[in-house]
Amino acid sequence: MASITKESLESKIKSILISEQEIQNAVVRAGEYINALYDGKPILLVSILKGAFIFMADVLRTVTVPCEIDFMVAKSYYSGTVSSGMVQITLDLTHDVKDYHIVILEDIVDTGRTLHDVVGLLKERNPLSLHVITLLDKPDRRVVEYTPDLSLFTIPDLFVIGYGLDYDEYYRNLPYIAEYGE
Ligand code: IMP
Ligand code: MG
């Protein structure tokens, strides 16, 4: 395998799709949505790792309602053409969600499998309410029917990197969202 260098990584950043400033404006919109929706009620912000950790850190600082945070790592397994899979939680929440209004923060909705399954699983635990905010949405790629409550950017069917999103674990540190490619 060729060794990874700064130059080899940079050569695959095709174009900037969403600037740092546009992301920050969207983060403010996410915070306004949460603050209006919950109007002072205590909430649990849940981020799905790893991709959504930067989005979570930024949205958290715009939230003015009483707020706790938690994290989960989830992978969905589907076989053939089935429209519902099995979600494997490799890191689970530390909170008992039945006492909380949950807001899930996700980096991107692609096939819809992860959120479809995570939302199904968390609803079985009877939270007071559950809403999902995604930074990015690729509706053209949907395999499982799933619509987030708030989607900040709808993008075409491209592979994107930056602001927490990776290709092969690299590029999470970019402050903008870019298209990845040769
Ligand atoms: P799903 O296909 O909707 O279940 O999305 C699963 C996960 O794939 C997302 O949470 C992302 O972590 C990852 N993913 C999907 N599309 C992209 C992309 O364009 N760039 C980086 N990660 C992606
Ligand atoms: Mg993700």
Image (tube, rainbow, N blue to C red):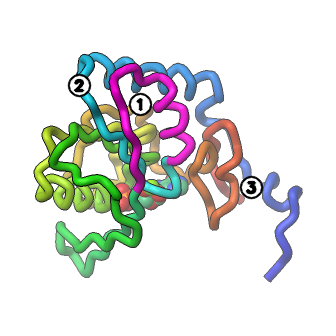
Q: Which residue is mark 1?
A: 152
Q: Position of residue 127 (x, y in %)?
A: 15, 46
Picture quadrant where residue 9 is located:
bottom right
The reply, left or right, for residue 51 in relation to residue 171 is left
Q: Residue at x 41, y 48 (%)?
A: 47
Q: Say which quadrant the N terminus sits in.
A: bottom right
- Which is nearer the eye, 8 or 59? 59
Q: Amino acid at mark 2?
A: Lys
Q: Residue at x 63, y 46 (%)?
A: 162
Taking the image as drawn, is residue 111 in sight?
no
Local crowd size for mark 3, using a 10 Å CA cut-off: few (<14), some (14–19), many (≥20): few
Q: Amino acid at mark 1?
A: Leu
- Relative to 34, say whether 154 is above or below: below
The secondary structure type at the circle numbered 1 is strand
Pointer 1 with pointer 2, Cβ within 8 A? no
Q: Position of residue 116 (x, y in %)?
A: 23, 56
Q: Which residues are magenta?
A: 53-71
Q: Position of residue 75 (x, y in %)?
A: 37, 69
Q: Say which quadrant the C terminus sits in.
A: bottom right
Q: Which residue is mark 2?
A: 41
The secondary structure type at the circle numbered 3 is loop
The reply, left or right, for residue 159 in relation to residue 68 is right
Picture quadrant where residue 4 is located:
bottom right
Q: Residue at x 34, y 22 (%)?
A: 65
